[in-house]
Image (tube, rainbow, N blue to C red):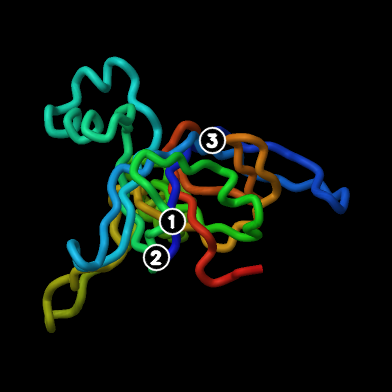
Amino acid sequence: MSLTLTGQKKGMAQVFDREGKLVVCTVILVEPNAVLQIKRKETHGYNGIQIGGLPMTQAQAKRATKPIKGHFAKIQVEPCRVIRESRLDEVDQYQVGQKLDASLFTDVKFVDVEGVTKGKGFQGVMKLHGMAGGPGAHGSGFHRHAGSTGMRSTPGRCFPGGPRASRMGGDRQTVQNLRVVAVKGNLLLVEGAVPGARSGIVYISKAEKKKG
């Protein structure tokens, strides 16, 4: 149960770490997240805080519904694109309207980053499942097909759930135990790649399995 901040993937870069080694890292913009609501076990059944990240543009704020506008106006916080909750053991140190930024990860060695992978559209079995396909000769007629997927007369059908051509990508994925290379203002640099394309929304939290 750790605090999760909302950020935006900005791309990848190469930097030198303290030991002089070249590190390929991902640059994540973590603009200050606002605490929107504090939930306590006595009233809500659990302890947690509601956090808003990535401020809305004027056009997005104009299209927001009245309940959303009222939720932000009540606490006098600029409307945010993303609202997310983090369940915590203790919430006494947080206040409504408080700003949380990338400095939270200054002393953290490893983080988990969650995002949505790039969408690849509808793909065949060779790209999606790594199948070998048929013979490459001219007469084969099934170069990139899956081949036979049927059964004998018993059961006389194809079992569901097998590898088929289908949609690829666009899935929520978490990459664990990424090393924090540097924290520079609102920029968080982590070693390796994170899911999603540039400007994609990501969620950063302290690593659960590797504390450093």
Pick whichever of labels 3 and 1 is earlier in the sequence: 3
Residue for badge 3: 29
The residue shown at (33%, 27%) is 78
Image coordinates of residue 98 in percent, x first then y, are 42, 41
Front one among 110 and 14:
110
Relative side of 136 to 27, left or right: left
Q: Is residue 121 left or right of residue 21?
A: left
Q: Quadrant of residue 35?
A: top left
Q: Residues within 10 Å of mark 1 (few under 14, many from 20)?
A: few
Residue 148 visible in the picture: no
- Label 3 residue SS: strand
Task: Please name the residue shown 27% across and 16% down the image.
Answer: 59
The amino acid type found where label 3 is placed reads Leu
**Judging from the image, what secondary structure is the residue with disc 2 in?**
loop
Say which residue label 1 marks: 93
Q: As displayed, is residue 40 above or below residue 53?
A: below
Q: Amino acid at mark 1?
A: Gln
Position of 162 relative to 17 (above/below): below
Which numbered mark, 3 or 1, is in the foreground of this view? 1
Residue at 73% in and 39% down: 14
Q: CA separation, marks 3 and 1?
A: 25 Å
CA gap, disc 2 and disc 3: 27 Å
The answer to which of 84 and 202 lies nearer the viewer is 84
Which quarter of the image is occupied by the C terminus? bottom right
- Looking at this view, is 77 or 122 the one in front? 77
Q: Position of residue 38 (x, y in %)?
A: 29, 52
The residue wearing badge 2 is 90
- Residue 174 at x, y percent in the picture: 45, 57
Residue 133, position in %: x, y?
A: 43, 57
At a point 62% along the width and 58% down the height, the residue shown is 108
Q: Are marks 2 and 1 in contact (CB under 8 Å)?
A: yes
